[in-house]
Image (cartoon, rainbow, N blue to C red):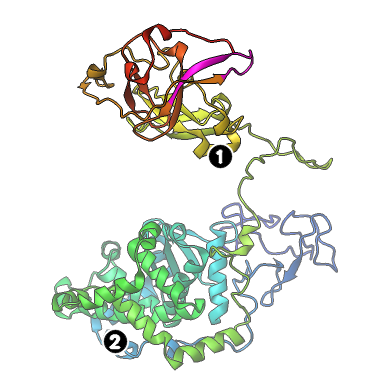
């Protein structure tokens, strides 16, 4: 007994292949098992009595399938395609496709190599030359589902082998023969594109497959492409003279043929998605290889600029490149999109394919089928855990601590300030642990007015709350003419303009006493401040740091009407 998926021998009593994990055919006894929990199914029912999973039978081989499966795992038949429906290559191919096909088949070297690859080596050999992972319901299931949707949209009744190739990165290709072809998708493409954009890429490869491009793309890859060393080392084309390749123009023929082949394949990719803007975005993403860069550019303006800057040299370089320039590719696709040919084929697919894209994708372009299984649930912000039933396990909650995160404006070191450790005031002075420099943080602007215990208008804190505990609250101890910054460089600071008012009295908060304070505004940011007399030293002038903007300015106490005997701890009882 052999596995129908990988061909490896298995035990006759086994239900799963020990090589690839594929479910094996139903045993001869007629006993059926649930594909989810592997329990026995009732003879006359398709619903598992243990887990409730619904099943159905394949229309081709009669094997048991999950109700939402699009492809039979035993015979690879795509289910749901109406009888007689298929999009033929002659319906969508580029007008120049027939001419370049004749040129390719007319070359004796290319024709001989194609015959040798088709009859002597076959699919197992050239499949083994690539580092790939075959997609399925267990491996890259989203890519496999997108491939099944695209196959049903164009009437491909047998699901092609779809691989993720590790060495191809942002490229995809179709290889094989006219009888048996397979598709390789670069491993970076599913990371770059969403599922709906990936539908265009796989539809593009199906365009190559239906138009019988697989054999010629394989010949080109092994004859003049990246796999030519593998072809020669295995003795497949030892009789061919390498000097004759250039004489017969093999590479030039493949260059022109691949350009037209890509135009043809783009048309089927557009028919599969039915959205020109989506197809254009997918091509642009593959061109830039970055979604962030694509969001910064206007595709329409870029295409017009490329057309305007086209020169003879750029056209010559395009002629020698097997991949057409993106601007030319978009222009060809737009012409097909605006043609009656596209409208007729689009109507045929939407009315006869038996599948509509409505409801399959969410607003982010991802398949709804896979959004039912989200990732880890974030911890809830509520204090009490949600109630759970007796049979369910409660969710594990990770304790969190709210904090303000940012960077020091001086040295750019990362900072995290827990909210529970911050004072209930409008602004606060922060000392960076890395550079030991201070900066002001406006808590009211960050956290909102609810952070304050009282309204800002009712609170006039002294300057003692604005400085670290190990510094004088309002006096730096240096002369106004010799104020030094954090680097030790002396900076001359001009005296502040006379924006301060005369000393006023304010009632004490708790003891029923009044004390004289010095009120005014900062000359830099016009923020109000109040300095108690008992905090003012007996000096002609003092240096004050504003709690809002952090600037230091001078106060000449003699000009403010403060006698020397009134400073330094004078408190008047009310």
> Would residue 111 be seen by someone viewing this image from the given angle?
yes
* Foreground of the two, 491 or 134: 491
Residue 155 found in image quarter: bottom right
Q: Which residues are magenta?
A: 507-519
- 262 above or below 46? below
Mark 2 / mark 1, whichever is N-terminal: 2
Image mark for residue 140: none
> Would residue 391 appear left or right of 189 to someone viewing this image?
right
Residue 436 in the image: state x and y as whole percent: 36, 21
Instruction: Give the residue drawn at x 37%, y 77%.
Output: 215
Residue 126 in the image: state x and y as whole percent: 39, 66
- 295 above or below 437? below
Query: How many residues crowd around disc 1 within 10 Å: few (fewer than 14), some, or many (20 or more)?
Result: few
- Which residue bears the numbered disc 1? 448
The total of numbered circles placed on residues is 2
- 480 above or below 122? above
Residue 243 in the image: state x and y as whole percent: 14, 73
* Foreground of the two, 128 or 168: 168
- In the rendered structure, does residue 390 fall within the stretch colored magenta? no
- In the rendered structure, does residue 516 fall within the stretch colored magenta? yes
> Would residue 6 be seen by someone viewing this image from the given angle?
no
Judged from the image, the secondary structure of the residue bearing numbered disc 1 is: loop
Residue 136 found in image quarter: bottom right
Residue 537 in the image: state x and y as whole percent: 38, 10
* Foreground of the two, 399 or 327: 399
- Which residue bears the numbered disc 2? 100
Looking at the rendered image, the disc whose residue lies closer to the viewer, 2 or 1, is 1
Measured in 3D between alpha carbons, the distance from the residue under mark 2 to the one under mark 1, in whole angstroms, is 69 Å
Q: Which quadrant: the C terminus?
A: top right
């Amino acid at each position: 007994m052999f596995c129908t998926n990988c061909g490896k021998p298995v035990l006759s009593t086994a239900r799963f292949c020990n090589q690839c994990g594929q479910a094996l055919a139903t045993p001869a006894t007629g006993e059926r098992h649930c594909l989810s929990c592997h329990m026995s199914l009732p003879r006359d029912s398709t619903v598992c009595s243990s887990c409730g999973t619904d099943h159905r039978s394949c229309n081709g081989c009669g094997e048991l399938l999950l109700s939402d499966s699009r492809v039979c795992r035993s015979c690879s038949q795509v289910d749901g395609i109406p009888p007689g429906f298929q999009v033929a290559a002659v319906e969508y191919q580029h007008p120049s496709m027939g001419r370049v096909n004749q040129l390719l088949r007319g070359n004796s070297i290319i024709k001989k190599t194609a015959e040798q690859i088709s009859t002597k080596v076959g699919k197992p050999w050239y499949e083994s030359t690539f580092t790939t992972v075959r997609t399925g319901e267990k491996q890259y299931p989203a890519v496999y589902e997108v491939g099944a949707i695209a196959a049903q949209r164009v009437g491909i009744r047998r699901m092609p082998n779809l691989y993720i190739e590790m060495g191809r990165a942002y490229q995809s290709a179709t290889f094989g023969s006219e009888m048996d072809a397979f598709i390789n998708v670069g491993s970076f493409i599913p990371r770059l594109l969403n599922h709906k954009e990936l539908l265009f890429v796989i539809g593009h490869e199906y365009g190559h497959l239906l138009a019988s491009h697989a054999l010629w793309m394989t010949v080109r890859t092994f004859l003049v492409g990246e796999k030519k060393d593998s072809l020669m080392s295995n003795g497949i084309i030892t009789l061919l003279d390498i000097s004759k390749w250039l004489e017969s123009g093999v590479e030039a023929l493949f260059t022109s043929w691949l350009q037209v082949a890509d135009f043809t394949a783009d048309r089927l990719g557009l028919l599969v998605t039915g959205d020109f803007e989506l197809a254009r975005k997918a091509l642009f993403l593959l061109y830039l290889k970055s979604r962030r860069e694509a969001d910064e550019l206007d595709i329409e303006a870029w295409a017009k600029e490329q057309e305007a800057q086209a020169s003879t040299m750029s056209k010559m370089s395009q002629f020698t490149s097997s991949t057409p320039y993106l601007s030319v590719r978009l222009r060809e696709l737009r012409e097909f999109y605006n043609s009656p040919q596209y409208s007729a084929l689009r109507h045929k697919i939407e009315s006869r394919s038996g599948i509509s894209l409505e409801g399959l994708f969410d607003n982010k372009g991802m398949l709804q089928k896979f959004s039912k299984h989200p990732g880890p649930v974030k911890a809830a912000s509520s204090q009490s855990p949600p109630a759970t039933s007796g049979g369910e396990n409660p969710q594990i909650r990770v304790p969190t601590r709210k904090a303000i995160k940012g960077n020091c404006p001086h040295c750019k070191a990362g900072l995290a300030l827990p909210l529970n450790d911050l004072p209930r005031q409008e602004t606060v002075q922060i000392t960076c642990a890395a550079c030991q420099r201070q900066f002001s943080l406006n808590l009211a602007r960050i956290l909102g007015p609810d952070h304050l215990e009282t309204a800002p208008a009712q609170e006039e804190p002294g300057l003692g709350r604005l400085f670290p505990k190990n510094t004088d609250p309002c006096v730096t101890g240096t002369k106004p003419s010799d104020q030094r910054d954090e680097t030790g460089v002396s900076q001359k600071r001009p005296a502040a303009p006379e924006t301060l008012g005369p000393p006023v009295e304010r009632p004490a908060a708790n003891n029923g006493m009044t004390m004289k304070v010095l009120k005014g505004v900062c000359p830099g940011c016009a923020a109000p401040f109040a300095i108690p007399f008992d905090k003012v030293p007996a000096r002609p002038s003092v240096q004050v740091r504003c709690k809002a903007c952090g600037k230091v300015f001078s106060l000449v106490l003699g000009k403010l009407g403060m006698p020397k005997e009134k400073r330094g701890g004078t408190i008047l009882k009310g």
